[in-house]
Image (spheres, helix red, strand yellow):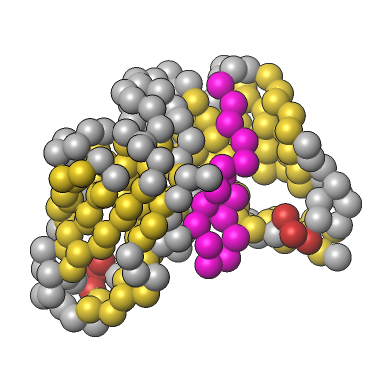
Amino acid sequence: DVKVTQSSRYLVKRTGEKVFLECVQDMDHENMFWYRQDPGLGLRLIYFSYDVKMKEKGDIPEGYSVSREKKERFSLILESASTNQTSMYLCASSLSGRGTGEKLFFGSGTQLSVL
Amino acid sequence: QKEVEQNSGPLSVPEGAIASLNCTYSDRVSQSFFWYRQYSGKSPELIMSIYSNGDKEDGRFTAQLNKASQYVSLLIRDSQPSDSATYLCAVNPTGGFKTIFGAGTRLFVKA
């Protein structure tokens, strides 16, 4: 089975802190994604990557950056955390390359609270 | 207009009944459609995918797609209390990486 592992289940940070969320997948998937999930808004795509060192903005990239130095690892960075970034963050991966609608495998999520 | 719309519910059905979950999407050229189930406090997991018009059955689940009406539905037959969850409709436009999710419909199955 595909395993997508997120480093922290719960995280509490202060406003202005730099925050790193880590995600690792073990099935050699090409694509990796970061979503945030808020009540009533569903999942919204922050960034995605279809190859090592490649990244593309999703629908809500403001205030975030990402890094993909190795195929299996995709990091989400909050440069200066703000209270409106309090949310559930979900990492996902999918197998195939450009243009196919493949299923997403999700990590267990990180509930981030910014105080 | 949201790109993927679902009734937020909650939808409440008695055990053994058919639960019907509906979804509409705005991008007419979308080609790939998915239903994810998300239990409270857990991450989404894929339960159905459908790519062509018509019905697709998998056990107690049936996905229905009507591209002309831009409409996707999920039927759950013989609903069980363990089916109580939020069901997320998701759409992947042709040639794109982005999977766009609806806000989800909460389903309660009463024993």
The relative height of residue A85 versus residue B93 in the rendered view (above or below) is below
Question: Seen in the image, is B6 located left or right of residue A11?
Answer: right
Q: Nearer the viewer, residue A105 or A46?
A: A105
**Residue at screen point 54% across, 25% down:** B70
Can residue B80 be seen here? The reply is yes
Residue A98 coordinates in the image, percent (x, y)? 31, 23
Is A37 magenta? The answer is no
**Residue at screen point 38% across, 27% down:** A96
* Quadrant into which the C terminus of chain A falls: bottom left
Q: Nearer the viewer, residue B29 or A100?
A: A100
Question: Seen in the image, is A114 located left or right of residue B29?
Answer: left
Residue B93 coordinates in the image, percent (x, y)? 40, 26
Range of residues picked out in magenta: B36-51
Mark count: 0
**Residue at screen point 26% across, 33% down:** A50
**Residue at screen point 74% across, 38% down:** B61
